[in-house]
Image: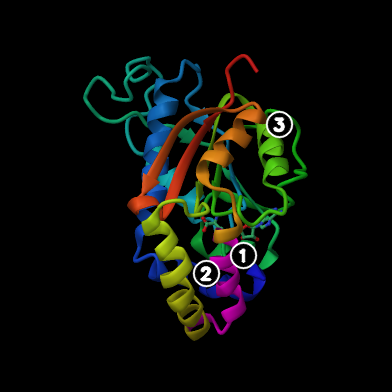
């Protein structure tokens, strides 16, 4: 299904969310940068996996935000995320891995000239050894994999101890505003707009239905804890239209 909408995916993401998706990704990356800046790890280098990474927007945002600021080797920035001269601490990001099931989505990575390797993979059975990554991003992917618990366990396995998994997702609506938005408003305009711009009405009907069928955010966090993660922060965006869930693999794991 994602192969069929890949060429219009970024445009429709931005258009349907009124560019909020850009701000949500930025918030998540800035927050991760602060968390990594405060962590006691010695290295300034970050190994990134953008899982269910699609066209690579999340990895691109991550690199821009993580690489801005002071990259000196001294310890000046290690505690508070700010260097001696006040600039935010910068990191060195290794070429990212953008992992996705859909070849069509991954094909959209290349024209963006992101410093990354696109890898076709299954999030529930990844072709990586244990502890290969310091940060895993998962933007709007958990809802799309057949087994979210399997993807969480696999993410835990390939994440290094002390690493972070950031899940940006639309969760099943719980409050009145969200129920109204996702059960009444969204089914009216999202499939129509999706059909108009991409010709794939069914893909955008699936989008709305998959949100309603997915877990609420509190149940997802419980599942993540059962998989071994600590829940560091749950950030609600725009009244609960989406959430950023920041998960930490304990340093002694
Ligand atoms: C809604 S898109 C999200 C793309 C991107 N992360 C973003 O932030 O816009 C969901 C992606 O999950 C991918 N996906 C679905 N099932 C998958 C699986 N089992 N393994 C890897 N990727 C999967 C799809 O191919 C699709 O590109």
Question: Label 3's element?
Answer: helix
Work out whether residue 166 or residue 241 is closer to the camera in this orientation and state it: 241
**Which of the image's four quarters has the C terminus?**
top right
Question: Label 1's element?
Answer: helix
Q: Is residue 185 above or below residue 28?
A: below
The secondary structure making up most of the magenta span is: helix
Magenta residues (range): 197-211
Query: How far is disc 1 from disc 2 in space, using C-alphas?
Result: 8 Å
- What's the mark number on residue 69? none
Q: Mark 1 CB in 8 Å range of ligand 1?
A: yes
Residue located beneath label 3 in the image: 157
Verify CB contact (< 8 Å) between mark 1 and mark 2: yes
Q: Mark 2 CB in 8 Å range of ligand 1?
A: yes
**Which of the image's four quarters has the N terminus?**
bottom right
In the drawing, does residue 182 fall left or right of residue 130?
A: left
Residue located beneath label 1 in the image: 105
């Amino acid at each position: 299904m994602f192969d069929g909408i890949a060429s219009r995916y970024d445009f429709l993401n931005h258009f349907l969310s009124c560019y909020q998706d850009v701000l949500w990704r930025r918030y998540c990356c800035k927050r991760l940068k602060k968390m990594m800046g405060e962590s006691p790890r010695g290295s300034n280098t970050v190994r990134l996996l953008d899982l269910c990474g699609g066209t690579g927007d999340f990895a691109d945002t991550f690199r821009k935000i993580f690489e801005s600021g002071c990259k000196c080797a001294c310890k000046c920035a290690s505690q508070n995320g700010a260097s001696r001269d006040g600039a935010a601490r910068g990191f060195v990001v290794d070429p990212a891995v953008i992992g996705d099931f859909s070849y069509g989505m991954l094909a959209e990575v290349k024209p963006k000239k992101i410093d990354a390797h696109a890898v076709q993979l299954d999030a529930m059975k990844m072709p990586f050894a244990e502890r290969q990554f310091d940060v895993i991003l998962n933007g709007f992917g958990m809802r799309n994999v057949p087994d979210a618990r399997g993807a969480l366990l696999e993410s835990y396995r390939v994440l290094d101890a002390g690493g972070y998994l950031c899940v940006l997702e639309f969760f099943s609506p719980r409050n009145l505003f969200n129920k109204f938005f996702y059960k009444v408003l969204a089914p009216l305009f999202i499939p129509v707009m999706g059909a108009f711009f991409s010709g794939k009405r069914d893909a955008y009907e699936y989008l709305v239905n998959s949100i309603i069928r997915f877990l609420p955010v509190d149940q997802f966090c419980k599942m993540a804890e059962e998989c071994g993660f600590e829940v560091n922060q749950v950030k609600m965006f725009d009244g609960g239209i989406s959430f950023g869930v920041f998960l930490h693999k304990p340093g002694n794991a």
